[in-house]
Amino acid sequence: MSKPVVAMVGRPNVGKSTLFNRLVGRRVSIVEDTPGVTRDRIYAEAEWNGIDFLLVDTGGIDHSSDELIPSKMRAQAGIAIDSADVIVFLVDAKDGLLPADREIAQLLMKRADNVILVVNKSDRPDLPDSYYDFYELGLGDPVAVSAANMLGLGDLLDLIVSHFPQDQEQTEEEDEIKVAVIGRPNTGKSSLVNAIIGEERVIVSNIAGTTRDAIDQPFEYEGQKYILIDTAGIRRRKNVDENIERYSVIRSISAIERSDVCILMIDAVEGVTEQDKKIGGMAHEAGKGVVIAVNKWDLIEKDSQTMGTFTRKIREELSFMPYASLLFISARTNQRLLNVLKEARAVAEHRAQRISTGRLNAVMEDAMMMKQPPSDKGKQLKIYYVTQVGVKPPLFSFQVNKRELMHFSYARYLENKLREAYDFSGTSVKFVFREKGEKDLG
């Protein structure tokens, strides 16, 4: 059974993101005193008294503007409303009842039985003067809370879960592959996510930086469950002027940290830039699986040498992660899009595989017979045995006579031999070297 979905809606700047963060117990949505900051739906898992549910933060519904982004914000909120089991409608106690609140209430009337009207910014124990005005909306008894001061949140959560279907079974989710789509602004990240899941899940426009939050989207393909994470485009630091965009960079880095596999989007027209290298370096340093997706491949004039030439250039520019898988795609024309999911699944499996100690040592012994370990000042490196002590990424512990004798070039040679014997494409592998008497890892 899927988790119940709770959507939070309301006009801009009524405190939806603050309440969202309180209810999920961590800072997930961007909070900034600027109307319109939250521009996409944000999903996060929440729990109350042993009941799990999915909480959705939406962009503020603003009927007064027909500009591109506000109009799409309304569409995003509409999608959230249509897909939610419970709708939390936030209004502002300090502003009182406004015409915009009435418009949103009209939008929600068809779902009135599942709407909880929440009067936020009720910062004192007694009810605010404006409280009774909200009865005019026809959505039942308002619930007074203060997200900032954490007042009334327990009662609100009790009310939310009381609206869930009583026969809803809470089950453990099967293993999901978390895939973060990362890259510079305007490389097609949101278009890729939208094309894969078949709906306009995140706002897509040719305005660089449209997606400001990292957005989780559950998805299933060929029996495998995924979480697709569309991240805000990471710009060069000197171009990050708004506080909001600074938060977005932090969110993108956080998305990389909690992912299993990163899809590094490269613009085929622009090629690999310094910023692409930095973003790829974040995923590499975090030990994540990496699939390099060269997007907008349909815009490139091609001959029989084009793909080979591009491949060599990309491998040269991103030489620090030669293991990364490489795909040439077009999110606009759907070219090879499903290969992205298939490759992400393969990479996730490679990151999780374990090799028995016996087989691992046999590979290393063959490698040492083909190329003797290095020596220095009459002392030769000795490798007594190797064992795998971790996964995601694969981690191998070597017991040696002297750590200093392990030259990085020989370690690279051993890694290459290991990769020849076992498929670790798409993932880094980590080696640690310890001397006799040192405590083993894991």
Image (cartoon, rainbow, N blue to C red):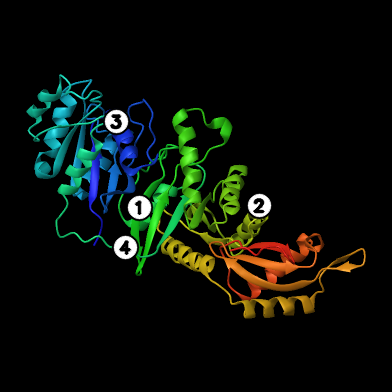
Q: Mark 4 — residue?
A: 172
Q: Mark 2 — residue?
A: 317
User: Can you give x and y, in whole percent of width and height, for residue 225 in the image?
Assistant: 36, 63
Q: Nearer the viewer, mark 1 or mark 2?
A: 1
| Nearest to N terminus: mark 4 or mark 1 | 4
Q: Mark 3 — residue?
A: 15
Q: Relative to the observer, which residue lies in front, 236 or 416?
A: 416
Q: Is residue 418 left or right of residue 120?
A: right
Q: Mark 1 — residue?
A: 217
| Nearest to N terminus: mark 2 or mark 4 | 4
Q: What residue is rendered at 36% in x and 42% in y?
A: 25
Q: Quadrant of residue 224?
A: bottom left
Q: Residues within 10 Å of mark 2 (few under 14, many from 20)?
A: some
Q: Is residue 272 visible?
A: no
Q: What amino acid type should be assigned to the residue bearing mark 4?
A: Glu
Secondary structure found at label 4? loop
Secondary structure found at label 3? loop
Label for residue 32? none
User: Can you give x and y, in whole percent of width and height, for residue 8 in the image?
Assistant: 25, 39
Q: Is residue 342 left or right of residue 323?
A: left
For marks 1 and 2, give the CA distance.
31 Å
| Nearest to N terminus: mark 1 or mark 3 | 3
Residue positioned most to the front: 437
For marks 2 and 4, give the CA distance.
42 Å
